């Protein structure tokens, strides 16, 4: 929470809406203030120079320059922040001393580092691709890019009306966990779409359950991508003479395909 004593340097600025009152024709007297600000976890702290209004409905307003500088990765549902910018790593995030014998450890958590833990577990030949092995990075949507997947429907397309499949007790539990986790990660969101696709599970070889969504009807109503696929014989010729082949299984690969 912000705290501090503002110096006495009053001047006037128009008040548009931060006071919570209707906008008037006058101006509020404001003052400059240097304050120390920390987040709710006491991990991120900095000194901010703010303008202080006589009346305000909010504690502080952090504008676009602050957001661009710190780049917080916010989980809006839980109100938590997962990641800060490189600037914050150097200037804003606090470091804590190691526990001594007189210190009682009340709780702990594990934070996966894209550089340290992932890099330490990878063979040398895969170090340049460590980002694709990170479990933390796999729980985020990729940025929008020119090659995002588009869902363009045919003229007069018939939207699918998916049926509801009966689920066993373990499958119902797995479905609730899947929906809860996907909502928190931002992979899915509540929708009022006129289209619906069926949801069910397929058993894995290891005994787990793989969630599946039947998009076959929707796919049949989409404009087909006309770009030609690479020729298989040409691809096989390029592998001629090779003796070692690698197969990579991406984590939660479907969320890595961003929809336009």
Image: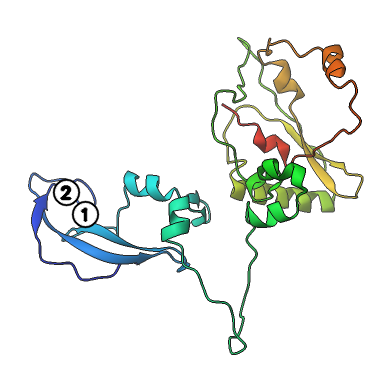
Q: Residue at x 89, y 27 (%)?
A: 242
Is 85 in front, or is 79?
85
Is 184 in front, or is 34?
34
Residue 30, position as x, y percentages in the image: 13, 57
Residue 31, position as x, y percentages in the image: 14, 60
Total labels: the figure holds 2
Q: Are marks 1 and 2 in contact (CB under 8 Å)?
A: yes
Distance between the Cα atoms at labels 1 and 2? 7 Å
Residue 34, position as x, y percentages in the image: 23, 64
Disc 2: which residue: 15
In the image, 203: left or right of 260? right
Q: Residue at x 62, y 81 (%)?
A: 105
Residue 96, position as x, y percentages in the image: 51, 73
Which element type, helix, strand or loop, lies under badge 1? loop
In the image, 187: left or right of 126? left
Which element type, helix, strand or loop, lies under badge 2? loop
Q: Is the residue marked by circle 1 packed among few (<14), some (14-19), or many (20+) residues within 10 Å? A: some
Q: Residue at x 76, y 23 (%)?
A: 216
Q: Is the residue marked by circle 2 packed among few (<14), some (14-19), or many (20+) residues within 10 Å? A: many
Disc 1: which residue: 19
Is 232 in front, or is 147?
232
Is there any visible trace of residue 115 in the rendered image? Answer: yes
Query: In the image, is residue 87 above or below residue 157?
Result: below
Instruction: Quadrant for residue 257, please give it.
Output: top right
């Amino acid at each position: 929470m912000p705290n501090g004593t503002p110096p006495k340097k009053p001047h006037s600025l128009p008040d548009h809406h931060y006071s919570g009152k209707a906008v008037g024709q006058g101006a509020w007297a404001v003052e400059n203030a240097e304050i120390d600000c920390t987040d709710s976890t006491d991990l991120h702290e900095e000194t901010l120079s703010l303008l202080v209004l006589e009346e305000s409905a909010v504690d502080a307003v952090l504008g676009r320059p602050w957001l661009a500088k710190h780049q917080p990765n916010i989980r809006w549902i839980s109100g938590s922040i997962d990641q800060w910018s490189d600037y914050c790593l150097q200037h804003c995030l606090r470091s804590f001393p190691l526990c001594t014998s007189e210190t009682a450890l009340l709780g702990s958590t594990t934070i996966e580092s894209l550089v340290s833990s992932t890099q330490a577990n990878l063979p040398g030949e895969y170090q340049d691709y460590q980002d694709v092995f990170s479990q933390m990075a796999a729980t985020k949507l990729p940025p929008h890019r020119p090659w995002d997947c588009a869902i363009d429907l045919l003229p007069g397309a018939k939207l699918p009306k998916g049926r509801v499949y009966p689920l066993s007790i373990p499958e119902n539990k797995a479905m609730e966990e899947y929906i809860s986790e996907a909502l928190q990660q931002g992979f899915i969101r509540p929708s009022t779409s006129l289209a619906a696709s069926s949801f069910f599970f397929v058993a894995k070889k290891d005994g787990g359950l793989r969630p599946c969504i039947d998009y076959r009807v929707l796919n049949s109503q989409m404009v087909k991508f006309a770009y030609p696929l690479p020729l298989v014989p040409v691809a096989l010729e390029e592998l001629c003479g090779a003796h070692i082949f690698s197969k990579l299984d991406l984590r939660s690969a479907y969320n890595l395909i961003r929809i336009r």
